[in-house]
Image: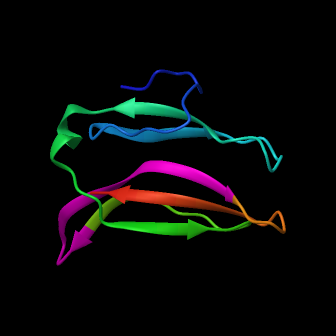
Amino acid sequence: NCSGEFSELSCPRKDQWVGGIEYIDHPRQPLILQCCTFHGLRFSQEVGLTNVGPGEAITGGEVIRDGRQISFDVIANVRKVVDVNTHMLVYILMNP
């Protein structure tokens, strides 16, 4: 269930995931997120934090092992960080 609006600075609830990002290329402008909810995520757990720089991408989705789907990675939260040299990184929190 997605709101259809880009209105959140984070998606902190356990049953939320990031459905979209509104990006404005300015160091002081935060990312504006579209948060989606799914009741089945209430038992999810953090599996990692990934730094994503300019030109890089991260993809969630099915995790297959030995021909079986064992989990489904979602982007649970996103945070933009700009260092003193205005190099931007986006921190991605993944949940299965």
Is residue 41 in view from this perspective? yes
Is residue 60 in view from this perspective? no
Q: How many marks?
A: 0
Check residue 72 for magenta coloring: yes
The residue located at (84%, 69%) in the rendering is 85
Residue found farthest to the bottom: 66
Magenta part of the protein: which range? 64-81
- The prevailing secondary structure element of the residues shown in magenta is strand
Residue 28 pos. (x, y %):
78, 45
**76 displayed left or right of 40:** right
Residue 69 pos. (x, y %):
19, 63
**58 displayed left or right of 74:** right
The image quadrant that residue 56 belongs to is bottom right
Residue 68 pos. (x, y %):
16, 67
**Quadrant of the image for the N terminus?**
top left
Q: In this view, does 77 lie above or below 92?
A: above
**Quadrant of the image for the C terminus?**
bottom left
Q: In this view, does 43 lie above or below 35?
A: below
